[in-house]
Amino acid sequence: MRLHNRDWVEVAITDNGLIDDALVEELHSGRPEDLLTPSKLEDPPGLHFAICQLLMQRMGGELNLYKLDDGRVLSRVILPIAHKNPAQRVPLEGPTSKPFSRSQGRG
């Protein structure tokens, strides 16, 4: 866990779990517009990830999954820290759709 800045906290977990590449892609791009096209987000575990992602977005945060080059999976949640006046919250800077890299900072 790390503080992004005074207004955001990031929790990232890297593990050796297995995840379908198409599921990760759909979480980033969204469900296909054609409702007749099958989606990985219609059934568990994709449905569960999609619900969690929606809840995080409604709270003003993010939930992202990434498949790393070495095959590991990075699960990352960014949440706003509570304020008396949320309008004073500093927005997230830069693209948040890329995983954090220890060697390069935010990619």
Image (cartoon, rainbow, N blue to C red):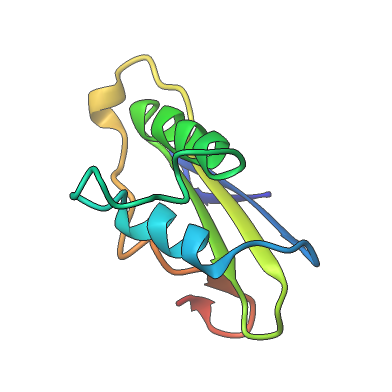
Looking at this view, name the residue that lies furthest to the top: 84
Taking the image as shown, residue 56 lies to the left or right of residue 49, namely left
Question: Which percent across, then down, holds residue 8?
Answer: 47, 42
Q: Residue at (64%, 77%) from the top-left corner?
A: 102
- Seen in the picture, residue 56 relative to 86 is either above or below; the reply is below
Q: Which residue is the extreme one toward the right?
A: 16
Residue at x-position 53% and y-position 45%:
46
Number of labelled discs?
Answer: 0
Q: Percent position (x, y) of residue 27?
A: 42, 53
Check the image and name the residue furthest to the left. 33
The one nearer the camera, 60 or 70, is 70
Report which quarter residue 100 is drawn in: bottom right
- Please tell me whether residue 12 is drawn above or below residue 54 in the rendered image: below
Left or right: residue 80 compared with residue 105: left
Residue in the image at 50% along x and 61% along y:
24
Q: Horizontal placement of 90 versus 52: left or right?
A: left
Q: Position of residue 82 (x, y in %)?
A: 46, 23
Vertical placement of residue 8 versus 30, above or below: above
Outermost residue, front side: 36
Observer-nearest of 40 and 100: 40
- Tell me the residue at 70%/79% (across/down): 71
- In depth, the one of 80 and 14 nearer the eye is 14
* Quadrant of the image containing the C terminus: bottom left
Instruction: Report x, y in % for residue 5.
Output: 46, 49
